[in-house]
Amino acid sequence: MKPVKLPKEQRDVLIEEIREYFENERGESIGHLAADSMLEFFMARISPYIYNQALDDCRQLVTQRMVSLEEDIYALEQKAKRTR
């Protein structure tokens, strides 16, 4: 799987959130580089799971839509008239 690349603006927001988390929850100050390293670590480890879950969600949605579409198609069928 290709590594996820975030736009700089999103990356900066996440890095700042990591820094705030450490400050608020752990009472520790970490620098920009340390927060960036943590972001890289977690993205490398977690992104495949998130990606696979998104694909599973997509599969379920497509399956539901296909069932609905199939029902709509059956509703269009016309009864054949018997002639004798």
Image: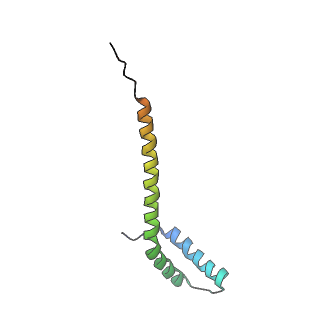
**Is 10 displayed left or right of 3 in the figure?**
right
Foreground pick, 60 / 16: 60
Where's residue 3, x and y in %?
Answer: 39, 71
Where's residue 47, x and y in %?
Answer: 45, 70
**Is 84 displayed left or right of 66 in the figure?**
left
Say above or below: 60 vs 3: above
Q: Residue drawn at (46%, 78%), measured in percent from left and top? A: 40
The answer to whether residue 58 is seen in the rendering is yes
Which quadrant of the figure has residue 73?
A: top left
Where's residue 18, x and y in %?
Answer: 58, 77
Foreground pick, 46 / 3: 46
Q: For the C terminus, give its image quadrant.
A: top left
Q: Residue drawn at (54%, 73%), measured in percent from left and top? A: 12
Type of colouring: rainbow
Say above or below: 63 vs 53: above
Q: For the N terminus, give its image quadrant.
A: bottom left
Which quadrant of the figure has residue 52?
A: bottom left
The answer to whether residue 5 is seen in the rendering is no
**Is 72 displayed left or right of 82 in the figure?**
right
Foreground pick, 9 / 19: 19
